[in-house]
């Protein structure tokens, strides 16, 4: 690398850190991508300036969300929408309702979404939003009151050809319904402004399953590249929400053995693997009763519950972190490797710290980064947008077939990019490079805007 290029890269990195010194999640995400793109910058320095522009969101919206609880007491939360990039299409990305949400978290998610949406090959820009609102333990009426207040501000910033939000942590079918109803009421417009909708009013088949199914399809492609398969692989799954549930279901369908589910209280282990009936019981506990995963033990005589622990201590072949960001740190990664795990495929967004990723690479562990491995959810959201535009609903088989093809294309394109830049089969770097170049070249074509 020439001194001039090195100086330019250093200057851009310093500028990003100077602008947002306290946004640790966002800076972590930027650093991870920056390192991967060094070969691109060396080959063509024009991309350094494009990256500097890309990391600054096109728009950041922060707003007050007041609402009244069941006791008649006023509550106030903070809402966010970061519209990161419209280079490839309307802003697209989920809404997260969780006490840990802040501007740094939403920016990191929007930044990751930019590469993920690019990799899907669909015409979608990138955005992300949410609130520090916690729906756990609240009544349906309280959740509805919050969602209606949230949408009363958000509606002016979104639209089917502008910005199309979806769900994320704690934003499922119930919340999407309340949000859509309020948008329709205010805008007097029935349009595909949200994805993840109910099938009866514009949703897509396979959408709830898409992130989990897609992650397993990605793993299947990676294993096939290595001359292996999912058959009889013992798999650790963290989380117990939508992504974890359908990751386990698809693993079972493809001959693997899902061993665990978890939540913030601990993890539950089925030593011989979960059956379909047992997975469906976890779904009922989490989606209907909304209780802790520990309640599963009342249903199964073989289950073991480990309070306050993570599932990474269980010997296995593959791991599918599907809970939240930074759930696997350096020490966890070392435990995984020591227990025989030779493949990690990220269902959650950025669940591995940068130090954990270095451990994977040092041990030659197959690594499917989130922006590639969990792109199935937004891919089917894009297919839902297409169906809404056509006023049609495709069959389950058609959507699943499209999803499987998209995940294969993502793996193939990531592998091709890594090989083009002499990085062998570094899928993490390849995904970053492939996703970035499509966005960057589009930004160059559209001018300095």
Image (tube, rainbow, N blue to C red):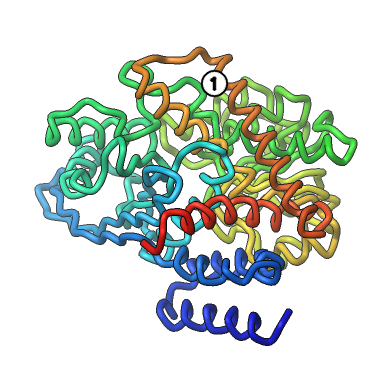
Q: Secondary structure at mark 1?
A: helix
Q: Residue 207's spot in the image, x, y percent?
A: 48, 28
Q: Name the image quarter holding the C terminus.
A: bottom left
Residue tagged 1: 399
Answer with left or right where residue 290 lies relative to residue 154: right
User: Is 269 or 443 nearer to us in this picture?
Assistant: 443
Instruction: Return the x and y of residue 190 as percentages of the image width and height.
Output: 22, 25
User: In the rendered view, would you say 288 is above or below 393?
Assistant: below
Residue 262 visible within the image: no
* Residue depicted at x 25% and y 32%: 180
Determine if residue 13 is in view. Answer: yes
Q: Residue at x 71, y 62 (%)?
A: 357
| In-front residue for pair 179/398 | 398
Count the numbered circles shown: 1
Within 10 Å of disc 1 (Cα), the crowding (few <14, some 14-19, many 20+) is: many
Q: Position of residue 344 (x, y in %)?
A: 73, 49
Kindly give the residue lying farthest to the left in the view shown: 72
Q: Quadrant of residue 392?
A: top left
């Amino acid at each position: 690398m020439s001194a001039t290029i090195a100086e330019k890269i250093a200057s851009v990195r310093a500028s990003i850190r100077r602008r947002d010194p306290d946004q640790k999640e966002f800076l972590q995400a930027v650093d991870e991508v920056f390192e991967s793109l060094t070969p691109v910058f060396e080959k063509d320095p024009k991309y350094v300036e494009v990256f500097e522009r890309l990391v600054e969101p096109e728009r950041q919206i922060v707003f007050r969300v007041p609402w009244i609880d069941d006791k008649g007491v006023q509550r106030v939360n903070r809402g966010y929408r970061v519209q990161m990039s419209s280079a490839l299409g309307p802003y697209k990305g989920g809404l997260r309702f969780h006490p840990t949400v802040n501007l740094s978290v939403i920016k990191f998610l929007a930044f990751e979404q930019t590469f993920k949406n690019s990799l899907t090959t669909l015409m979608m820009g990138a955005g992300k939003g949410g609130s520090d609102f916690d729906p756990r333990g609240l009544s349906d009426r309280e959740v509805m009151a919050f969602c209606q207040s949230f949408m009363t501000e958000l509606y002016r910033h979104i639209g089917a050809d502008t910005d199309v939000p979806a769900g994320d942590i704690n934003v499922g079918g119930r919340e999407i319904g309340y949000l859509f109803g309020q948008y329709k009421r205010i805008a007097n417009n029935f349009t595909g402004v949200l994805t993840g909708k109910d099938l009866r009013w514009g949703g897509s088949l396979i959408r709830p399953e898409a992130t989990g199914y897609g992650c397993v399809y990605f793993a299947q492609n990676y294993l096939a590249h290595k001359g292996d398969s999912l058959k009889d692989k013992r798999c650790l799954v963290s989380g117990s929400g939508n992504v974890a549930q359908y990751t386990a279901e698809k693993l079972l369908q493809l001959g693997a053995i899902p061993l665990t589910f978890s939540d913030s209280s601990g993890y539950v282990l089925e030593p011989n693997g979960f059956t379909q009936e047992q997975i469906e019981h976890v779904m009922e506990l989490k989606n209907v009763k909304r209780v802790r995963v520990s309640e599963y033990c009342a249903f199964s005589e073989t289950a073991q519950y480990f309070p306050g622990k993570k599932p990474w201590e269980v010997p296995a072949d593959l791991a599918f972190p599907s809970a939240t960001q930074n759930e696997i740190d350096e020490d966890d990664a070392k435990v995984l490797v020591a227990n025989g795990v030779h493949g990690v495929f990220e269902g959650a967004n950025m669940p591995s710290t940068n130090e954990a990723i270095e451990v994977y690479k040092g041990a030659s562990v197959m690594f499917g980064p989130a922006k590639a491995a969990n792109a199935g959810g937004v891919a089917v959201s894009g297919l839902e947008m297409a169906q809404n535009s056509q006023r049609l609903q495709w069959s389950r088989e058609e959507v699943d077939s499209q999803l499987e093809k998209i995940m294969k294309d993502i793996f193939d394109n990531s592998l091709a990019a890594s090989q083009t830049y002499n990085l062998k089969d570094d899928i993490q770097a390849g995904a970053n490079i492939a996703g970035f170049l499509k966005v960057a070249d589009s930004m160059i074509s559209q001018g300095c805007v």
